[in-house]
Image (cartoon, rainbow, N blue to C red):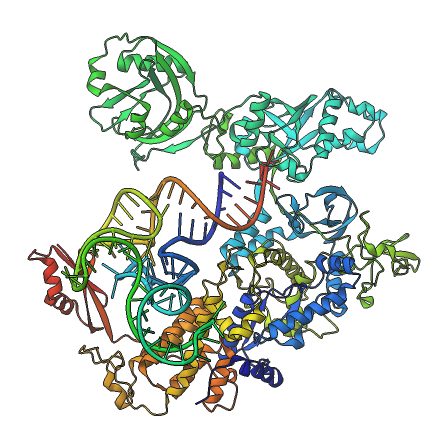
Amino acid sequence: MEGRYIPENIEGKWQKKWEEQGTFRQYGRERKFYALDMFPYPSGAGLHVGHPKGYIATDVIARMKQLQGYAVLHPMGWDAFGLPAEQYAIKNKTHPSKTTRENVATFKGQLGRLGFTYDWDREINTTDPEYYKWTQWIFLQMLKKGLAYESYEPIIWCPSCQTGLANEDLENGACERCGTIVEKKPMRQWVLRITDYADRLLEGLGSLDWPESIKESQRNWIGRSEGTVIRFQIINPKLQFPNKSQNTDSKSQTKEEFIEVFTTRVDTLYGCTYVVVAPEHPLIREQLTDNSEQIAEIKNWEEVRAYIEETKKKTEMERTAEGREKTGVRLEGIMAVNPINGEEVPVFVADYVLGDYGTGAVMAVPAHDTRDFAFAKKYDLPIKNVIMPHLTDKKNPPREGKKSVERNTIHALVRNPKDGKFLCLEWKNHPWTTFIVGGVEDGEDIVEAAKREVLEETGFSNLRHIGTLDRKVRSEYFAAHKDENRVANTTAVLFELEDESRESVTEEEVAKHSVLWLSLDEIRNREMTCAELDIWLGWLEGKDDAFVDDGALTDSSEFSGLSSEAAREKINAKLEADGNGKKVVKYKLREWVFSRQRYWGEPIPVVHCEKCGVVPVPENELPVFLPDVESYEPTGTGESPLAAIESWVNTTCPTCGGPAKRETNTMPQWAGSSWYYLRYIDPLNQDVLVGKELEKEWMPVDVYVGGAEHATRHLIYARFWHKFLFDIGAISTDEPFRKLCNVGLILASDGRKMSKRWGNVVNPDDMVRDFGADAMRLYEMFMGPFNQNISWNTDGVVGTRRFLEKVWKLQNRLTTDNLPPTTEESGLTTDNSSATSPCADPLAKTSGQPTKIDCLLHRTIVKVMEDIEAMRFNTAVSTLMILVNAFEKEGTITKESYGIFLLLLSPFAPHIAEELWAGLGNPESIFLSTWPVADLALLVEDTVKIVVSVNGKVRDTFEVPADATEDDLKAKAFASDKIAKFLDGREPKRVIVVPGKLVNVVV
RNA sequence: GCCGAGGUGGCGGAAUUGGUAGACGCACUGGCUUCAGGUGCCAGCGUUCGCAAGGACAUGGGGGUUCGAGUCCCCCCUUCGGCACCA
């Protein structure tokens, strides 16, 4: 009756109407919902089908929320500062603002054809002076609070992009943008003190409804660790007798006489056998610049200097490359004193210690740190075990209420060189197989004790000592033969049999156990009564690693025996009491290097005055406009192209009126995106960046959708700025994004990323032309779990288009009354159950009662709503498809049901829903209607299908009323001849009945 | 190495608290229709044995718990993502 479904005839029409009538600007409503997309960078390539996926999702949510009665804020804008536009400008001599304008127009056109509900009156462009005025304003507030400062520390420099970068802009030591290996370059730069917020950024994560992976990335990035800074006194002839009276140089007055190290493992302090400082450490840096007298402190200064020079030449990449061999040089003539025991240890400089983390120096504990271990092995430094692995014997765990006895023990591993088998004991009164075990008397030699035990228990008398595992292992177990819990600190001792000569063994020993020779394989396969077995086997195989886990202390004076955790507390307390250490928290997060030596970004709003120094541009003079330049080329000297524009650079000081020069660095691309979501709320406000009342109404963002690649930049920066704005009272919320959802990539059909380079890009315009915007939207929501990467398949769009064709045709089957279906087979008439439910009774239709299809419809209402809410768009769409298939089978559909269905469909396929809604005679937009509410009575299942299985295998099914009793089900199950066949005369051993579900017969 | 998320037909993927594995869609096959040429209709479609009825086997691999496991537990393999000489 309405002709064919031709999307192009209806989509543009409704898009125009929605815009003209302000259908999606229902801001007056009481309840607010803010749906936000990560705004795009308007590149020259235009959109491919991957871009809109997230936008479609927020659009679906926005439309449903509006139907549910919310005022919905759903804006869009452009993150338009950045290098690509600038590079394009350099190449084509076109002003970046022109390129940006053109690209934005392209993007906007493409988005428009997909029928989004954006309010373009709130469009934001980060390059718009009206916008970046406020970006600059925020910077000035940070300056005021001391959160923005100038620094001359070496920074990361990308030689290809010709600009400094933040730590976050690196990917495996290379520039994230261009892949170039970066360098360190000392230069003046602006830095934001983001680490002041490290703790709050970390804590705030807890309350956020974000994907766990993103939260975890941020936790990794912030990298909080609790540890201790410990002072190691330096012993050096010059420092011990400092000739301070002769030297008035203030630098040498404050010269450090100790090295501060940072460790998270203060429990290993007794195992420290040397100290390492980074090449950047002040102890050495001073040596480089100071006079010759002081250089003499390090006797091998030339060697040390050469090492440091070499380190400097290496890129960050080379220095931190995985598996790189450790290098370093000892500082001759200097010793450091371990404050816990007064032990003197040597000091090294090595580049495996990082200058910019912790204190730039570490105490090396080779026995319990893999890096120190590797270094100690290479330079043959002592390795001192102070942490015992701490095991609990799982086969004989300690028992509650039994007394506990701690003792030192040995395990003698005795190998017969003839066949490589090991001497074991098989116990007679216990199901045990052990090595030769025994206690060590006080003061007794370990090896002697082991020999004694072998002799006593087995009689073998002629042993050759091969080795002793210097790492003791603590294990706890229940010793049944003594009825007590044991804490054994065990040393393994390896022997070989010289010969098989054997002395007699006492009756007592013979009664306890018998000798058994086992090969290593047999030992591995047998249930040995030995918690330490894995460690012993590792030792025999020649494994040689640091033991880095927590354990129990040994050889640590009064702390011996404590657990690592307890020891940390006690040792910290002692260090603190003696003034030799204090607990501290360190972060991996580095300050945000905020200046870029490029043109296309927000000018940093300060001037440099000869008299007054750095002076902020007064707020009423903002924005500091980005001037036009002749050449956008970076100077390469570390100065921005802006430096060349004298008329712009030269200005007067706002404070003293004297001559001053403008700051020529610009802000990184991440500046504008760190607060844009606030400006959408109040885009035209001339007085403040966002009006307080409006901010309170809309914030925080209810759902924020975008790619996971922004985990450690945009999403940290934005949270940082947001918390800052909260602190200065500009806004009322502490976190910007309550719920975050990651959109999965759409890959090309070849499985690669869509890119011009591979020639595999699919343009959404083509999809809209061939299948319509609605089919394209549906497909992107249907193709799989929203947050998953999935390959594009245009055939899939055919499927959703077919679905819409079916929807379109359903309008020919409308009934206004509730007459029975005109087609004979409804699929339901085969249902011959005796159910009384309206949903199961096909005759109910004639009496105007709800039918099975109504039940399905109402279940669909619930399911679609829940799925959209939970971002499970794929199953929401499939539920709609199931409903349509059922409608088709039904033959007819009431106007009312069709209307409800169209409402459910409308968030996904708004144009066709709107068209068909109008076709039903509704004068007003479907989106000004209300979301259907499910009738609870129709959701209750009245009949259920019961599965009958025999031994867990399904053999039959039948339908019963939902309230059928267990006995009913049992009776019905046994009445089935199929079941009888499988029982085959056997007596059921057991019958499990789950009412409403199944009957399982066990035979 | 550490952390996080996964592994189900030919493909994308469904499966409340453990309770008929494979919904929905694509592709494919057969038939119908149509001016054949990516948008029509009907049926079939995990593998395997069988003419069929029906049976056996199936959710990365191996164990375990259970009347019953894609789902819970242990071990292993593997894919993707984050961090990584951060002491």
Task: From the viewer's perspective, tell me whether residue A452 is left or right of residue A310.
Answer: left
Residue A946 % position (x, y): 21, 67
Residue A544 appearing in the image: yes
Q: Residue at x 80, y 52 (%)?
A: A634
Q: Residue at x 22, y 20 (%)?
A: A512
Above or below: residue B29 compared with residue A203: below
Q: Nearer the viewer, residue A788 or A438?
A: A788
- The total number of labels drawn is 0
Q: Quadrant of the N terminus of chain A?
A: bottom left
Residue A859 appearing in the image: no
Task: From the viewer's perspective, tell me whether residue A514 is left or right of residue A709.
Answer: left
Residue A284 % position (x, y): 73, 30
Task: From the viewer's perspective, tell me whether residue A416 is left or right of residue B85.
Answer: left
Above or below: residue A642 compared with residue A15: above
Residue A303 % position (x, y): 73, 23
Task: From the viewer's perspective, tell me whether residue A494 is left or right of residue A702.
Answer: left
Q: Nearer the viewer, residue A374 or A459?
A: A374
In the image, farthest residue toward the left? A985
Q: Residue at x 23, y 80 (%)?
A: A829
Above or below: residue A905 compared with residue A812: above
Q: Quadrant of the C terminus of chain A?
A: bottom left
Residue A763 % position (x, y): 58, 67
Q: Nearer the viewer, residue A149 or A783?
A: A783
